[in-house]
Image (cartoon, grey):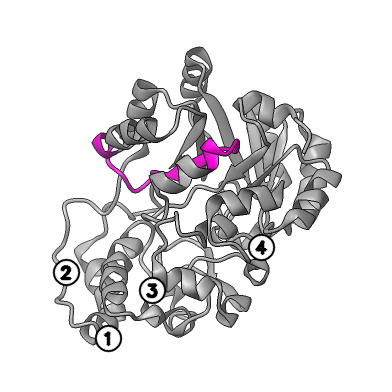
């Protein structure tokens, strides 16, 4: 695989990026395995406190001396998502109460906070200076981007529409990830509603390449070398892969989730707001299907995820894949490898 502006900018051997996973699915082991093999390992840190991010960075640096990325969500909440009213708290619990009872969980107490604040997290990013700072759901303030550039932190923004890519390009980010609707996990829109921003990967890439100066990284539904070749043929200069790395033993997906990724069930994924309050792609299961028509009752992000996170923990302990999020892209049927190094070299 030839070098590109992506690999040169990131200081890596191969222009291959491991997608960052939020919600505790990322792991230092996976990041280090990819970075040590010449790609860019990533860690989704949006759910961590500033102190946890600082400790994470120290741990990463004991596992790799190569480049790596820490990822945050610029938009850290939807309307009322960080300050859910007591009434909405009760309504959300009522919607999810059958699952809490089925898993023998007590009703949760109203928390001090439903999630983390980007404004506090970015302060520690600028303090610890990771080699790469990647972000989704928007663009940090100009002052933050300038400070990253001043400190030598490479910035990677994510777009799911051509307009979002142009916006990122104009703001001066170093690299742009163009991620199509085939991708597993969240649809990280920021200019329009996620449901109105559903571009397929191989329609999205050439449109973005034609409109921006910034090097483009393709993502979404790429799980083997054929997808890599197609992405480069359409003008991408790097590829970001999520599900194939999520399925490896080095990720923090857990045995239940990994088994589902390799099962016939992974052929059927759908977009849902049921698990986090934001639109995301996962394997169809009972909870996803039952909450499909309850959009008006689902709490905003991150409050919905605060509730379902408690369900997921218990579901994992009880072996219940029907009551937990199972993020997965549309190309899981192509999965073959169980270790990160095998995935990386198969793509190369």
User: Which is nearer the N-term, disc 2 or disc 1?
Assistant: 1
The residue sitting at the top extreme is 150
Considering the numbered disc 4 on the image, is that residue within a helix, a strand or a loop?
loop
How far apart in space, not on screen, are marks 1 and 4 (Cα)?
A: 31 Å
How far apart in space, not on screen, are marks 3 and 4 (Cα)?
A: 20 Å
- Label 3: how many residues lie within 10 Å, few (<14), some (14-19) or many (20+)? many
Residue found at x 55% / y 48%: 19
Circle 3 sits on which residue? 324
Considering the numbered disc 2 on the image, is that residue within a helix, a strand or a loop?
loop
Considering the numbered disc 3 on the image, is that residue within a helix, a strand or a loop?
loop
Above or below: residue 286 compared with residue 46: below
The answer to whether residue 75 is magenta is no
Q: How many marks?
A: 4
Circle 2 sits on which residue? 108
Circle 1 sits on which residue? 98
Quadrant of residue 173 within the rendered picture = top right
In depth, the one of 107 and 64 nearer the eye is 64
- Number of the label disc, if any, that sits on residue 182: 4
Query: Is the C-beta separation of discs 3 and 1 under 8 Å?
Result: no
| Magenta segment | 34-52
Q: Is residue 248 left or right of residue 78?
A: right
């Amino acid at each position: 695989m030839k070098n590109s502006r992506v690999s040169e900018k990131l200081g890596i051997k191969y222009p291959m990026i491991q997608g960052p996973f939020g919600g505790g699915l990322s792991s230092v082991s996976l990041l280090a395995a990819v970075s040590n093999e010449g790609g860019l390992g990533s860690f989704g840190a949006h759910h961590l406190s500033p102190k946890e991010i600082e400790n994470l960075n120290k741990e990463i640096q004991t596992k790799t001396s190569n480049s790596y990325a820490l990822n945050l969500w610029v938009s850290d909440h939807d309307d009322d998502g960080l300050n859910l009213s007591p009434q909405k708290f009760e309504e959300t619990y009522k919607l999810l109460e059958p699952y809490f009872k089925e898993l023998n969980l007590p009703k949760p107490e109203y928390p001090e906070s439903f999630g983390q604040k980007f404004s506090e997290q970015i302060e520690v990013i600028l303090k610890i200076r990771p080699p790469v700072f990647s972000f989704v759901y928007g663009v940090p303030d100009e002052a933050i981007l300038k400070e990253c550039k001043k400190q030598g932190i490479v910035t990677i923004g994510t777009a799911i529409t051509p307009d979002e890519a142009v916006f990122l390009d104009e703001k001066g980010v170093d690299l742009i990830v163009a991620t199509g609707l085939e991708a597993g996990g969240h649809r990280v829109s920021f200019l329009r509603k996620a449901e109105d921003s559903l571009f397929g990967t191989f329609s999205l890439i050439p449109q973005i390449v034609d409109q921006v100066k910034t090097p483009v990284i393709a993502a979404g539904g790429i799980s083997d070398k054929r997808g890599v070749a197609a992405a480069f043929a359409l003008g991408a200069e790097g590829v970001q892969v999520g599900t194939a790395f999520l399925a490896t033993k080095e990720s923090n997906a857990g045995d239940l989730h990994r088994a589902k990724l390799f099962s016939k069930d992974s052929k059927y994924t759908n977009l849902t707001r049921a698990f986090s309050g934001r639109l995301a792609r996962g394997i169809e299961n009972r909870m996803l299907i039952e909450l499909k028509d309850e959009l008006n009752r689902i709490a905003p992000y991150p409050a919905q995820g605060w509730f379902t996170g408690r369900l997921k923990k218990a579901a994992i302990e009880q072996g219940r894949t029907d009551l937990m999020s199972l993020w997965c892209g549309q190309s899981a049927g192509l999965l073959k490898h169980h270790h990160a190094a095998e995935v990386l070299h198969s793509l190369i």
